[in-house]
């Protein structure tokens, strides 16, 4: 007992010291994190509250139940936006995944100039969506961009006017978004490919697997945790897409390329229907949760499995 | 017939020379162990034999056929990796049959082969599990199964046991040895564990910095090491290497350690005569130094009794390691656990002088 006391004192002193030493860490990480999390959560709660009130131009209290939700879902804007989201989301995620994977596999062949190429492919990520949208709106504008160029080269019959075509306009957004974020998918896939145990490849070589079988049976299966991560990140980007569409098509022609975020914006700030806008925003949040919650559960299960192994 | 011939193989990575003229020849049924310290080029040599890496110059011949331009899959080899390299997304069964799948072997034949190997290695119960659900020892077995299912001309093992704990390693070592005796396969086995080398090998190649130091059967490598490096590398505790000089006394050549009164003399073979009057390095294994009652041999002159002071004792249970002072140097001896020495006391020891090795102190090469 006699020497247990000083030991305890020493321990607590060490505790204080190390806490002091880690003070800058707390200040730089935890304070901003708590502030922004508080911000986020309080506004989310506020939005949820507003979505159940009869607010129009200004927030007012009151309770209208699910009326805002039913009327939002009944509007044509919302149905079109949601259909577009399905189309855009799946097209964009699949294409960027595929292109990212192909680029990563090609880069993984230890070619020369890999660093340069990697930077080139990653570069679009560094550009803001507004810039991407604006540039692609020029490129895809039949009177200015690609069509004009090809026409000028002599192929006068060439038509590439998706931007002004009601049925195809949504695909211009897919193109721009894929251009912007395939490099990101590539970077993650490349990291995954590089972390594949070199002995696995050797074993497969001795087993006699050709390059296609090697990738299909041995290497790509190890990538699927990364694939899930990429899909989730791209999906949540797709669901919240706003600036890209604003700059590229403005939701047009007509309302052909509306996405949920644009509908929220439209209700809240153009029509002055705050409560409906809030309801639409909450619907977006629910869509996001439908993606993120299974992902979180999956990650938790993975971690449990890793801990057990 | 030579199962594997390695002829003057060099390997450079950029400007670094990793293998410097390797020449080895192995007969069918040989269990050859490549042993050497980390980074000496063992894995590189094994990868070159497998065709996973291309030598800078020289030839590899497997089963009488030059394979330098033949892909790994067509070299008729199987390999077991240190990391096991099991395909994580496949079941044990698929792991074992993947090679056959690549060669389009019919399903019935595959199932039969898996059954045979699974029975041999007692992994029948694991066939439908994924590698992630196996223990280290089980993974090791599966990795062996993947190699055994092929029945190749040549097995290559790259430190297959180094990820196992000591007990499991000892068990698997015995199993590998039994497998080799039963199947009579030709094996090249890389390790840096000299006990594995001694217990498994029919031939040992000791490597250092890309050069083969000695290529011989375990007994020769152990008892007649080709140079000081081999002498110190093989054996635990390692061979004592002591500065000595050769002198001619009464028509016989003796090695003298220390000076004047305290000098200790050991008879050495007459072939060392040419070194009379010169300095040498005398090598003697710890087990050749024991308590005076130890009966090494009846041959006259085989055993010399010396007096030395005991600096330290390390009882290991089965025997006791004593640290002695011989002249200016320390030497290890292995005495019976019944003998209890006190520290700093002087005691008598019997030395089996038949197994003394002499080395040239300048080059480190063996004299006799
Ligand atoms: N691809 C490579 N590029 C450059 N140097 C390499 C390469 N592979 C191996 N080396 C070098 O070659 C030397 C021998 O490597 P190797 O892997 O054959 O050693 P080893 O004897 O198997 O060692 P260990 O017991 O640690 O496995 C090392 O110095 C290593 O750094
Ligand atoms: Mg190695």
Image (cartoon, rainbow, N blue to C red):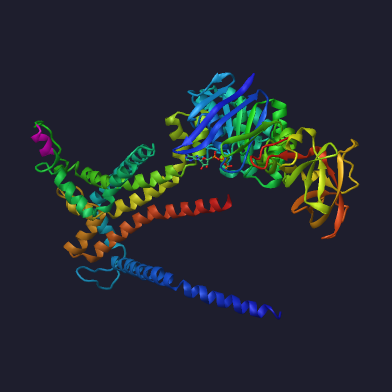
- Residue B182 in the figure: left or right of residue A115: right
Quadrant location of the C terminus of chain B in the rendered image? top right
Instruction: Identify the residue at image location x=41%, y=46%.
Output: A191
- For the magenta stretch, what is the residue range? A147-153
Relative placement, left or right, of B19 versus A73 is right
Q: Residue at x 46, y 54 (%)?
A: A297
Q: Residue at x 30, y 70 (%)?
A: A63
Q: How many marks?
A: 0
Q: Quadrant of residue B129?
A: top right
Q: Position of residue A122 (x, y in %)?
A: 30, 48
Q: Please state the horizontal and vertical placement of residue B192, each as a whole percent of the image.
A: 63, 41
User: Is A151 inside the magenta-drawn segment?
Assistant: yes
**Residue B16 visible in rendering:** yes
Confirm whether residue A90 shows in the render: no
* Residue B13 on image: x %, y %: 46, 37
Residue B224: x and y in percent read 73, 35
Nearest to the observer: residue B303 or residue B327: B327
* In magenta segment, residue A266: no
Horizontal relation, residue B294 to residue B90: left or right: right
Q: Quadrant of the N terminus of chain B?
A: top right
- Ligand 2 lies in quarter: top right
A271 vs B361, left or right, is left
Q: Main secondary structure of the magenta part?
A: helix
Is A7 placed above or below A127 here?
Answer: below
Along the line of sight, the residue nearer the viewer: B268 or B117:
B268
Q: Quadrant of residue A93?
A: top left
């Amino acid at each position: 007992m006699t020497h247990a006391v000083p030991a305890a004192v020493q321990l607590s002193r060490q505790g204080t010291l190390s806490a002091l030493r880690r003070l800058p860490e707390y200040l730089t990480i935890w304070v901003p994190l708590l502030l922004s999390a508080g911000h986020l959560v309080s506004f989310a709660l506020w939005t949820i509250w507003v979505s159940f009130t009869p607010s129009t131009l200004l927030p007012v209290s009151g309770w209208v139940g699910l009326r805002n939700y039913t009327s939002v879902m009944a509007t044509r804007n919302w149905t079109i936006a949601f259909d577009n989201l399905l189309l855009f989301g799946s097209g964009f995620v699949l294409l960027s995944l595929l292109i990212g994977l192909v680029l990563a596999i090609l880069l993984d062949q230890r070619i020369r100039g890999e660093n340069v190429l990697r930077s080139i492919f990653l570069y679009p990520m560094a550009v803001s969506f507004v810039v991407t949208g604006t540039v692609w709106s020029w490129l895809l504008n039949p009177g200015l961009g690609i069509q004009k160029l090809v026409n000028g080269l002599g192929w006068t019959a060439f038509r590439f006017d998706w931007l002004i075509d009601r049925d195809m306009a949504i695909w211009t957004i897919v193109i721009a978004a894929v251009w912007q974020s395939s490099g990101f998918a590539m970077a993650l896939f490349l990291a995954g490919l590089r972390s594949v145990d070199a002995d696995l490849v050797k074993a497969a070589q001795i087993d006699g697997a050709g390059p296609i079988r090697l990738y299909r049976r041995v290497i790509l299966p190890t990538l699927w945790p990364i694939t899930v991560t990429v899909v989730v990140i791209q999906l949540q980007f797709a669901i919240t897409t706003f600036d890209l569409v604003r700059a590229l098509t403005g939701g047009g022609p007509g309302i052909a390329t509306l996405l949920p975020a644009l509908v929220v914006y439209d209700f809240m700030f153009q029509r002055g229907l705050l409560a409906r806008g809030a309801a639409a925003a909450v619907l977006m949040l629910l869509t996001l949760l439908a993606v993120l919650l299974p992902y979180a559960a999956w990650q938790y299960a993975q971690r449990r499995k890793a801990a057990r192994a | 017939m030579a199962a594997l011939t390695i002829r003057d193989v060099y390997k450079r990575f950029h400007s670094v020379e990793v293998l410097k003229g390797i020449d080895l020849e192995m007969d069918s049924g040989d269990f050859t162990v490549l042993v050497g310290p980390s980074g000496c080029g063992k894995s590189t040599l094994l990868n070159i034999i497998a065709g996973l890496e291309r030598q800078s110059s020289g030839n590899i011949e497997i089963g009488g056929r030059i394979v330098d331009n033949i892909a790994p899959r067509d070299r008729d080899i199987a390999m077991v990796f240190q990391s096991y390299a099991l395909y994580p997304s496949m079941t044990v069964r698929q792991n074992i049959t993947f090679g056959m799948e690549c060669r389009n072997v019919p399903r019935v034949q595959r199932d039969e082969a898996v059954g045979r190997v699974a029975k041999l290695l007692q992994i029948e119960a694991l066939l439908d599990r994924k590698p992630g659900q196996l223990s280290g020892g089980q993974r090791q077995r599966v990795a062996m199964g993947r190699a055994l299912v092929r029945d190749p001309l040549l097995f290559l093992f790259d430190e297959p046991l180094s990820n196992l704990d000591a007990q499991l390693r000892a068990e698997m070592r015995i199993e590998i040895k039994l497998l080799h005796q039963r199947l009579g396969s030709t094996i090249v086995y890389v390790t840096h564990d000299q006990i594995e080398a001694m217990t498994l090998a029919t031939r040992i190649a000791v490597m250092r910095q890309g050069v083969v130091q000695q290529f011989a059967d375990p007994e020769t490598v152990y008892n007649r090491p080709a140079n000081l490096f081999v002498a110190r590398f093989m054996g635990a505790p390692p061979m004592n290497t002591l500065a000595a000089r050769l002198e001619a006394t009464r028509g016989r050549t003796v090695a003298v350690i220390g000076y004047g009164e305290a000098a200790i003399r050991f008879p050495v073979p007459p072939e060392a005569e040419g070194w009379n009057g010169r300095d040498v390095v005398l090598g003697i294994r710890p087990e050749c130094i024991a308590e005076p009652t130890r009966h090494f041999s009846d041959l006259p002159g085989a055993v010399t009794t010396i007096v030395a002071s005991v600096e330290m004792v390390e009882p290991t249970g089965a025997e006791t390691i004593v640290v002695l002072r011989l002249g200016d140097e320390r030497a290890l001896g292995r005495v019976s656990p019944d003998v209890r020495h006190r520290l700093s006391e002087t005691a008598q020891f019997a030395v089996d002088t038949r197994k003394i090795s002499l080395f040239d102190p300048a080059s480190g090469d063996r004299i006799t």
